[in-house]
Image (spheres, rainbow, N blue to C red):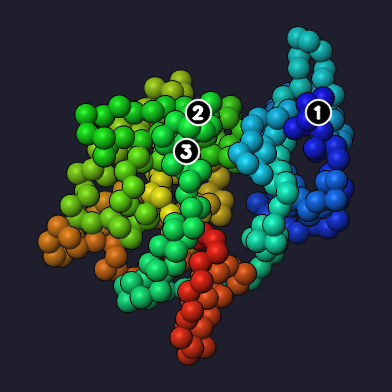
Amino acid sequence: MSAANALITRFKFDKLLNQDQGGRRIILQGRIGGQPALLIAERGAFGTDEYYLSSFSRLLLHVNNLGQNDIYRWYLANSLPDNTLDQPTPPDVKINLIYPCTEKHVKKYSFQQFRGVSESAEVYGKYVRPYMSRCREEGRLDWVFNIIEGRAEQEDVLYRSKESDKNDDYLLLPDLNWDRKTVGSLHLLALVTRRDIWSVRDLKKKHVPWLRKLRTTLADSVAKLYEGVEADMLKFYVHYQPTYYHFHVHIVHVNLDAAATQSVGKALGLDHIISQLETMGGGDEAGMADVELSYTLGEASELWEQIFLPLKEGREPTVNATGGGN
């Protein structure tokens, strides 16, 4: 057994932090060798073979490491023993392990009440933009730049574009929550290589041609990577607030259940963003920084604690960036 796989067997359960996605995903808090750890387990696409379904209730037996990035590791597992060499049991559980985890991770994955907030252009400029800037200044995007510049995790890069204009370049990577083989639940991330766009807020009317080209080339690239996938089988969206402040686009198969990652209050359709920019009044510099955006925040998130709760209570926010978006 590899050292990475052995970590799973050493995990000592303390308590259930959360359960979501219709009971298909659980977050367990525990310890490995005296250090705190979070184990996030969710079911992958289930097989439809009759023998597999009739034996479904058996316990997890096999764990296969897919990779890791710093304290984050992800696995595929079988809940059944192997049938035969000719009929192996398909992996049916996706596991993410955070080890060692921090109190910030525990807060992020614990159940928390969510709040709907409206971020005006004024609130963005006065409070949220400085928060983003401080997060970036702390070096929290070094791991992203290491991937873009080819210094780390190149085995996970599915495609690297080579456009005539370097500002048009991007990388395609699998989302950590995708099992990397079930096309119907395909979920990819497109990291743009340009660094001047932190989030959707930086998009302006002048970026419309770039966005249209990006969407077209992304659709073409994904269709070439996965047999049977066509452009109209894909959805494109961005998060606001994003998890990290470097512009990236989520690409998912239309058959993927619209879970929290695609929900209203989190996801903004790329096509809708392009249309909004095109029809927006003003010159080329007019953009998404000028509009009001509504989204949801957990009560444990720093944006809620530092900005929106004080505003709700009539207090002046104090921005102290020690993490990314919610």
> Is residue 46 positioned above or below 136 on the image?
above
Location of the C terminus by quadrant is bottom right
Q: Nearer the viewer, mark 2 or mark 3?
A: 3
Residue 236, horizontal then vertical, whole percent: 39, 44
Marked residue nearer the N-terminal end (3 or 1):
1
Asked whether residue 40 is in view, the answer is no
Residue placed under numbered mark 1 in the picture: 62
Comparing 58 with 117, the one in front is 117
Comparing 268 with 154, the one in front is 154
Comparing 113 with 192, the one in front is 192
Residue shown at 67% from the left, 63% from the top: 107
User: Rounded to the nearest whole Å, what is the CA distance between mark 1 and mark 2?
Assistant: 27 Å
Residue 235, horizontal then vertical, whole percent: 41, 42
Quadrant location of residue 133?
A: bottom left
Residue type indicated by callout 3:
Asn
Marked residue nearer the N-terminal end (2 or 3):
3
User: Badge 2 local density, few (<14 within 10 Å), some, or many (20+)?
Assistant: some
Residue shown at 70% from the left, 61% from the top: 103
Mark 3: secondary structure: helix
Residue placed under numbered mark 3 in the picture: 146
Quadrant location of residue 119?
A: bottom left
Residue type indicated by callout 1:
His
User: Badge 3 local density, few (<14 within 10 Å), some, or many (20+)?
Assistant: few
Looking at the image, the residue that sits furthest to the left is 283
Residue 301 is tagged as: none
Residue placed under numbered mark 2 in the picture: 154
